[in-house]
Amino acid sequence: MKVKVLSGDHAVAHAVKLCKVDVIPTYPITPQTLIIEKISDFIFDGEFDATFMHADSEHSAMSMAVGASATGVRTFTATASQGLALMHEMLYVAPQTRLPIVMANVNRSLGAGSGIWAEYNDSMPERESGWMQVYVEDCQEAMDAIIQAYRVAEDHRVMLPMMVCLDAFVLSHTVEKVLVPEQSEVDAFLPRFRPMNYLDTSNPKFINIAVSPAHSMEMRYQMDHLMRGVAPFIDEVDEEFSKMFGRRYGGVIEEYRMEDADYALMTLGTATSTARVAVDELRAEGRKVGLIKLRFMRPFPHERLRRALEHVKAFGVFDRSISMNGFGPVFTEARNSLYGTGVPVTDHIAGIGGRDLTVQMFKEMFQRIEDSVKGGGRDCYWHGLRGEQI
């Protein structure tokens, strides 16, 4: 295993090479362009044997990815924000046709006012598309999540695409020490892709045909049932990964200092690192607080979350996106998980559009969570907002 100093984007590119991906359709967009530029360098320098395809848009890139994966080859692409939105139509094809494409999405603002900084309003709306979604905390996890993604997605019990989400600039362009595994180690963990059902000219067949009302409802039911059953496979793969590489991420969630916590906060992405510092400082003051890192938004870890929060008095959820219904999407899912438990749940929206997240901000969130036990407060707080909350 080598130690390298890599950005989050370059860590993803190294992982794609180690996974021996066959086909990579691409279209550049900030801040993911570093990923496909680095992959292009690997291929040009003769270090990586893969088919690199320049598309004329992100819609075309995803169309190419669907076509390539349908022929039974390992496929990767990357995008961000408006690029992901342009893929929207084709995103829905991959899950229904059980194509295990892996895609990196570098999260940034979407739409007006335009911005290129971290926010989850690009990927969160796509949580209903049937793609699995994992959010990573640092450059090492960005690399490892790509390797784990292929192992989960290509399992014949799963066969669903996975979106690996990493924060714009805070992670995509920030360099850190990354342990890069040897090719032999990745080969032992991730065998060559064995397609389950693919297009073959010697055995012609249709996929993605028009479906009448007699069958479409059952297709949606089967997709929902499949997604709800994926979480144990993710936990299983994470456990196998830890035995091979010595790093464990907890599967669908990671618990931090939760063993005796009375009050807990759930975060995702790079915000988790800042929240860990807040937890440590509050613990030093004698406050019994804990942290849950949400890794997978799909499948959402309802069961694991309920078990992790059995003993807490109150719970808060960090959201870096807004559903324009008064709450963020992660809060809505988490409150569903805890329905009927009686645990007060509050939403804490912050970091929208790349606004800085501070340790003090997370301490304020914990204070709001503790106060929620008394009742009478809000269900949703915006932190770091200029001016008064309406």
Image: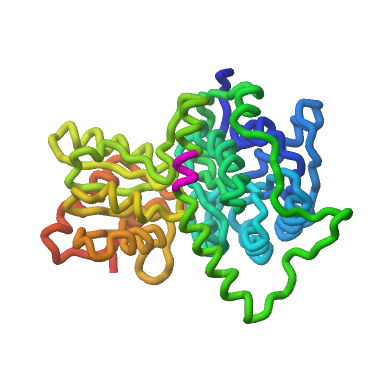
x and y percentages locating residue 260 in the rendered image:
18, 39
Q: Nearer the viewer, residue 147 or 203?
A: 203
Residue drawn at x 47%, y 26% as measured from the top left: 243
Q: Quadrant of residue 115?
A: bottom right
Q: Nearer the viewer, residue 361 or 181?
A: 181
Residue 233 colored in magenta in the image: yes
Is residue 103 depicted above or below 92 in this figure?
Answer: above
Is residue 106 depicted above or below 1 in this figure?
Answer: below
> Magenta span covers which residues?
232-236
Work out which residue is located at the far bottom of the displayed protein and give it. 213
Is residue 11 depicted above or below 103 in this figure?
Answer: above
Q: Which secondary structure is most common in the magenta stretch?
A: helix
Residue drawn at x 52%, y 44% as measured from the top left: 166
Residue drawn at x 30%, y 37% as measured from the top left: 256
Q: Nearer the viewer, residue 121 or 294?
A: 294
Q: Nearer the viewer, residue 318 or 229?
A: 229
x and y percentages locating residue 388 in the rendered image:
27, 63
Is residue 44 toward the left or the right of residue 175 in the image? right
x and y percentages locating residue 122 in the rendered image:
54, 58
Quadrant where the C terminus is found in the figure = bottom left
Quadrant where the N terminus is found in the figure = top right
x and y percentages locating residue 30 in the rendered image:
63, 47
Q: Is residue 38 visible?
A: no
Work out which residue is located at the far front of the displayed protein and give it. 203
Q: Quadrant of residue 93?
A: bottom right
